[in-house]
Image: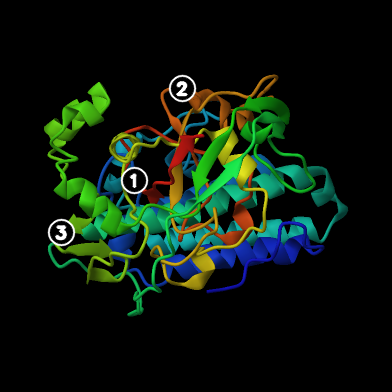
């Protein structure tokens, strides 16, 4: 996979080209048929991801007349201020434009962006360009998670890429790190890029707490299952219990008895690796069963002020790995915190202000990145968010408890 240059790299044209090349590399193993399908309303076809990320640069950075007028509607996601949008659940019905035409569109946008970089005008749009690159990295992860869900619905259970050895190291002991009570600051402090939802930096009080040194493993989650975890309503929030019954949940999304569907096809469940593809409801039920709880996002960020390392997209594994005591990588970690604005938050003016702020309701915050997250994309203040029922992302569990 192409290397992603750090956000602060001095050559903006090279950084732009590297991020765009990474997206193309992720789509390269897929056929045109693979790129056209949509497996559920929450997922999007790869072809749409390719078109939408080009649309973002064309709309918010380049401006002016679009390459094709109809693309302004087809590849708009949720920006009401920009205009009409094709319905999200029907993106898989777009047999036209073809994948070849979408790639031509990307090429045209890239040519115009490189022309912009050759002038001094790009400096006036530097903040929007950086937002666009981080936006594209979000869609890189979505390409992988959406393809994984798509392939899991195929009876052939195909593999996304080349065969990869997923054997893991021995799991580390389930230790705890303690933190004293006190007033701390959380939120982005700079320098470098951050999304608006990571600001403003502000003070919080955190009581004494402990946080697990590693993520919950498949073996530990299997014990929860064997102990009736999916059959004991006292462990579950009411909405989660009703959803579990209605959808027949009895294990993480991609478990098939003693096997697990991965981006490399069906593999035996590795007991040592972190469990993934669980909802907030499942994570919360497991925490109750384990006589613990999920950390708040403030607690997670307080604990994460260390070196940012872990199993990210660049490893090529595309699956959680055992043996890491890092708070980053492998699987996004559900927190107990509702996705809400920080004190003093103000969305940006104009349509670009719709990026985050209008979703601050009925969702929970996840932290830390995953095995499908570009390493240069994540940081300790990063706030991911999904509805409590979401399972198709690489979402896992880290426990916390009071002391």
Regarding mark 2 in the picture, which secondary structure is present there? loop
> Image point 42% across, 71% down: which residue?
317
Taking the spot 69% from the left edge, 66% from the top edge, the residue there is 5
Q: Is residue 53 left or right of residue 388?
A: right
Mark 2 or mark 1: name the one nearer the start of the chain.
1
In this rendering, position of residue 255 left or right of residue 367: left
Q: Nearer the viewer, residue 316 or 99?
A: 316
Marks 3 and 1, the one that precedes in the sequence: 1
Q: On the image, numbered disc 2 is attached to which residue? A: 361
Nearer the viewer's eye, disc 2 or disc 1?
Answer: 2
The answer for how far apart the CA atoms under marks 2 and 3 are is 33 Å
Residue 99 in percent (x, y) is at 39, 61
- The figure's colour scheme reads rainbow
Residue receiving disc 3: 256
Q: In which quarter of the image is residue 301?
A: top right
Q: In this view, does 346 lie above or below 176?
A: above
Q: Which mark is residue 336?
A: none
Q: Name the residue under label 1.
A: 43
Q: Which of 159 and 211 is in front in this view?
A: 211
Q: Nearer the viewer, residue 291 or 327?
A: 291
Is any part of residue 50 visible from this angle? no
Q: Residue furthest right?
A: 120
Circle 1 Cα neighbour tier, 10 Å, few/some/many (<14 / 14–19 / ≥20): many
Q: Position of residue 108 (x, y in %)?
A: 59, 59
Q: Callout 2: few (<14), some (14-19), or many (20+) C-alpha neighbours within 10 Å?
A: few
């Amino acid at each position: 996979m192409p290397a992603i240059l750090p956000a602060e790299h001095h050559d903006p044209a090279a950084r732009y080209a590297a991020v765009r090349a990474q997206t193309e590399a992720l789509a390269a193993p897929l056929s045109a048929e693979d790129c056209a399908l949509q497996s559920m309303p929450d997922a999007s076809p790869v072809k749409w991801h390719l078109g939408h990320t080009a649309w973002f640069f064309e709309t918010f950075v380049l401006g002016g007349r679009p390459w094709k007028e109809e693309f302004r509607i087809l590849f708009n996601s949720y920006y009401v201020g920009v205009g009409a949008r094709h319905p999200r659940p029907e993106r898989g019905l777009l047999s036209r434009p073809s994948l070849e035409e979408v790639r031509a569109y990307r090429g045209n946008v890239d040519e115009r962006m490189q022309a912009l970089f050759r002038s001094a005008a790009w400096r006036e749009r530097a903040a929007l360009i950086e937002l666009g690159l981080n936006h594209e990295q979000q869609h890189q992860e979505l390409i992988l998670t959406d393809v994984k869900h798509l392939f899991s619905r195929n009876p052939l259970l195909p593999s996304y890429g080349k065969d990869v050895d997923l054997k893991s190291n021995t799991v580390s002991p389930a230790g705890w790190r303690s933190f004293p009570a006190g007033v701390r600051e959380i939120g982005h402090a700079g320098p470098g890029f951050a999304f608006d939802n990571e600001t403003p930096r502000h003070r919080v009080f955190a009581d004494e707490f402990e946080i697990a040194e590693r993520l919950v493993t498949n073996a530990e989650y299997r014990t929860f299952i064997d102990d009736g975890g999916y059959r004991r309503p006292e462990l579950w929030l009411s909405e989660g219990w009703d959803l579990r019954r209605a959808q027949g949940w009895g294990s993480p999304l991609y478990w098939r008895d003693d096997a697990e569907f991965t981006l490399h096809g069906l593999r035996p469940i590795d007991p040592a690796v972190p469990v993934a593809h669980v909802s907030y409801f499942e994570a919360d039920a497991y925490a109750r069963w384990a006589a613990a709880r999920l950390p708040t996002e403030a607690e997670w960020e307080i604990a994460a002020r260390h070196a940012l390392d872990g199993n990210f997209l660049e490893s090529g594994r595309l699956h959680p790995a055992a043996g890491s005591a890092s708070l980053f990588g492998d699987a996004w970690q559900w927190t107990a915190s509702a996705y809400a604005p920080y004190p003093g938050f103000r969305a940006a003016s104009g349509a670009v202000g719709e990026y985050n702020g209008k979703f601050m309701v009925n969702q929970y915050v996840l932290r830390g990145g995953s095995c499908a997250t570009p390493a240069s994309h994540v940081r300790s203040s990063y706030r991911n968010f999904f509805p409590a029922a979401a399972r198709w992302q690489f979402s896992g569990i880290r426990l916390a408890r009071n002391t």
